[in-house]
């Protein structure tokens, strides 16, 4: 058509063909059930904790070549995106969440060439990689901080948050901290630094000083390191405690009310959204990225402020309402199925089609999925409940996240003494609470065995061989779980009825049906104490998911006269007569996905 317009003027023709698209109004994407389709909405994400995934050189510590050697395993599982917990140079005060050099790979994990090979291997297998952006704080060994602490007029002084202490002759160093902020890892959030006789803020460990994001140079340096990795071909970021970046002006003391949940204050600073919008503009928007923020302290109702796609901040966040249903502060607490269902109903109500959700019940900061939300009283129930929970995660609304080992049904570790633990959070709390007599060692350890982060950090169980096939070396950095005797990838990848093989089928089902991604969600029976029955519908694609979240059998009548149609996937072999019926005979921990 255009050729007819300008037969004799090729240059003009070229100019017009280049200009026209720019002139034409941006094609609004074809929405799916009101959602803008995105690869990261259709993806299943797999979190790798590199220190515990696969060792390749026998030093007992997982590494990048080890992950590369297992990419076929992940591709076969069917996952689309790998979230790599921190791989950067770090003194490992908090296992990598304390970064010394953002443009260098941790020596124990390998080289930049190893990273490039890993990224290439992931792309070759049509998967993507997001890395962990830890920029609320750095390591105290990062050169910014090494400079900053030397003198009050050092050009990097204002990269961190330094304040005068309150004179108190009775206090160590003669000063009390600037305010009453507690650290997440026990004790005060302030550390006195003798060199300049001032305190610096560290909401986490002493070796994790908080960056001062109010300093535009800090923001520019962060955006520049993000661009460094995006230029390498990384597909996005999981952002560590990102809502905490905007501190309270004047840093007044917490009130007694605020002291009960400081995150609620710290996560809602005055410049948070402005800085995330600047980050999106200057570091993310030029690339096709996926971003997920770790939103501690953000109420569900406030999440759209960060994830509504019209605000150009983050794509999604981790909300902790579900995964922390079994916690009261640090203490374990029992929970019920209606409580779980209430979380997802609240999410469905609070997040409209501009605010995409995440679905997860495990990560490197929480105990093992099947031990916390399933039933490990027998091996059979461990397998069934692990499959049931994967069914739930892969059919609820939002991008599902699988943590390494969940696909095998890995369990918590039989920790005995405090020496068995590595985690700084656990060790600091032992000093702060047990050694001061606030809580007995028995009570503390009993709780930690159920809630401790190290439960998820024990090495991946590849075989039933020495060190569970995680390392050819004599000793792993953290003891592997002896139950790799029965729970290991070698056995499960060869067994059609394993948790691995079932999870593979459930992921394939999600990929095959848009309704399980973009479909409307309806909880059919929110108050039922034992059954979780819900639908996902998109046009004439209609799915009924029924989960018997209990170790007791039951006969369940699907509400509203709804008939379960064709069975697409069950975690137990199902007799034909259990299709096209309203009454379902469900065995303990049985899950079924039907059309209807
Ligand atoms: O976690 C923040 C966070 O939510 C945890 O500290 C959590 O409160 C606690 O561990 C529950 O037991 C992020 C990282 O995921 C975590 O691994 C780091 O330790 C922390 O930030 C500091 O970077
Ligand atoms: Ca190694």
Image (spheres, rainbow, N blue to C red):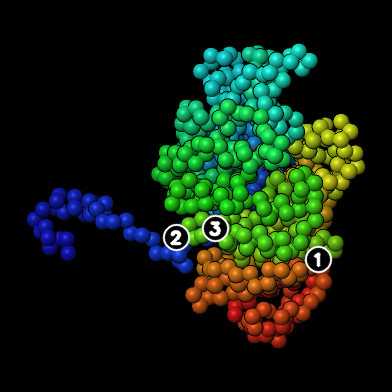
Q: Is residue 297 left or right of residue 28?
A: right
Whole-Å distance between the Cαs marked 1 and 3? 34 Å
Residue 469, image x and y in percent?
75, 49
Relative to residue 357, is residue 194 drawn left or right?
right
Q: Is residue 175 visible?
A: yes
Q: Nearer the viewer, residue 185 or 504?
A: 185
The x and y percentages for residue 13 are 16, 54
Q: Which residue is mark 1?
A: 381
Ranked by sequence position, the earlier of labels 3 and 2 is: 2
Give percent across and percent down for residue 120.
52, 47
Distance between the Cα atoms at labels 2 and 1? 39 Å
| Mark 3 surroundings: few (<14), some (14-19) or many (≥20) residues within 10 A | some
Residue depicted at x 80% and y 50%: 332
The reply, left or right, for residue 24 in relation to residue 491 is left
Could you tell me which quadrant the N terminus lies in?
bottom left
Looking at the image, is 534 positioned above or below residue 437?
Answer: below
Picture residue at 45% right of the left edge, 48% below the top: 311
Q: Quadrant of the C terminus?
A: bottom right
Q: In this orientation, does residue 399 appear?
A: no
- Number of the front mark, 1 or 3: 3
Q: How many marks?
A: 3
Q: Secondary structure at mark 1?
A: helix
Q: Quadrant of residue 203?
A: top right
Report the front residue among 175 and 425: 175
Q: Which mark sits nearer the N-terminus, 2 or 1?
A: 2
Q: Outermost residue, left direction? A: 8
Residue under the point 22% across and 51% down: 19
Q: Which residue is mark 3?
A: 351
Q: Nearer the viewer, residue 65 or 418?
A: 418
Kindly indicate the quadrant of the structure image that contains residue 445. top right
């Amino acid at each position: 058509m255009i050729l007819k317009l300008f037969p004799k003027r090729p240059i003009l023709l070229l100019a017009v063909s280049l200009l026209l698209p720019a002139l034409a109004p941006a094609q609004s994407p074809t929405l799916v059930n009101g959602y803008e389709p995105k690869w990261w909405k259709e993806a299943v994400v797999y979190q790798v904790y590199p220190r515990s995934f696969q060792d390749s050189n026998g030093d007992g510590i997982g590494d990048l070549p080890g992950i590369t050697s297992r990419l076929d395993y992940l591709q076969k599982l069917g996952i689309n995106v790998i979230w790599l917990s921190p791989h950067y140079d770090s003194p490992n005060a908090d296992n990598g969440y304390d970064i010394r050099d953002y443009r260098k790979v941790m020596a124990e994990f390998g080289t930049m060439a190893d990273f490039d090979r890993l990224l290439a291997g992931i792309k070759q297998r049509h998967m993507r990689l997001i890395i962990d952006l830890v920029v609320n704080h750095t390591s105290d060994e990062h050169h910014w901080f090494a400079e900053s602490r030397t003198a009050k007029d050092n050009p990097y002084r204002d990269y961190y948050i330094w304040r005068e202490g309150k004179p108190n002759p009775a206090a160590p160093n003669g000063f009390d901290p600037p305010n009453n902020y507690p650290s997440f890892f026990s004790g005060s959030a302030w550390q006195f630094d003798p060199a300049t006789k001032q305190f610096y803020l560290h909401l986490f460990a002493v070796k994790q000083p908080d960056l001062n994001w109010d300093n535009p140079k800090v923001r520019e340096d962060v955006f520049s390191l993000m661009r460094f990795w995006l230029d390498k071909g990384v597909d996005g970021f999981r952002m560590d405690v990102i809502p905490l970046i905007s501190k309270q002006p004047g840093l007044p003391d917490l009130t007694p009310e605020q002291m009960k949940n400081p995150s609620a204050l710290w996560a809602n600073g005055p410049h948070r959204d402005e800085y995330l919008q600047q980050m999106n503009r200057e570091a993310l928007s030029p690339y096709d990225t996926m971003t997920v923020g770790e939103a501690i302290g953000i109420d569900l109702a406030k999440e759209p402020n960060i994830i509504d796609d019209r605000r150009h901040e983050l794509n999604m966040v981790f909300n902790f309402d579900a995964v922390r249903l079994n916690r009261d502060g640090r203490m374990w607490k029992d929970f019920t199925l209606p409580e779980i269902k209430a979380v997802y109903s609240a999410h469905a109500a609070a997040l409209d089609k501009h605010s995409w959700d995440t679905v997860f019940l495990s990560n490197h900061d929480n105990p093992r999925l099947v031990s916390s939300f399933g039933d490990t009283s027998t091996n059979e129930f461990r397998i069934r409940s692990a499959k049931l929970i994967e069914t739930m995660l892969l059919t609820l609304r939002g991008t599902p996240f699988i943590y390494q080992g969940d696909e095998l049904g890995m369990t918590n570790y039989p920790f005995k003494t405090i020496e068995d633990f590595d985690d700084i959070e656990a060790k600091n709390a032992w000093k702060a609470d047990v050694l001061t007599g606030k809580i007995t060692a028995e009570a503390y350890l009993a709780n930690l065995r159920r809630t401790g982060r190290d439960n998820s950090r024990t090495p991946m169980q590849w075989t039933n061989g020495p060190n569970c096939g995680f390392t050819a070396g004599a000793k792993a950095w953290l003891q592997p779980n002896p139950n790799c005797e029965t729970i290991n990838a070698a056995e499960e990848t060869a067994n059609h009825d394993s948790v691995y093989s079932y999870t593979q089928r459930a992921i394939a089902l999600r990929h095959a049906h848009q309704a399980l991604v973009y479909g409307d969600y309806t909880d059919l029976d929110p108050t039922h104490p034992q059954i979780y029955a819900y639908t996902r519908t998109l046009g004439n694609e209609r799915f009924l998911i029924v989960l018997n979240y209990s170790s007791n059998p039951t006969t369940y009548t699907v509400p509203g006269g709804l008939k379960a149609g064709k069975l697409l996937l069950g975690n137990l072999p199902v007799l034909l007569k259990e299709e096209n019926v309203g009454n379902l005979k469900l065995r303990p921990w049985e899950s079924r996905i039907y059309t209807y």
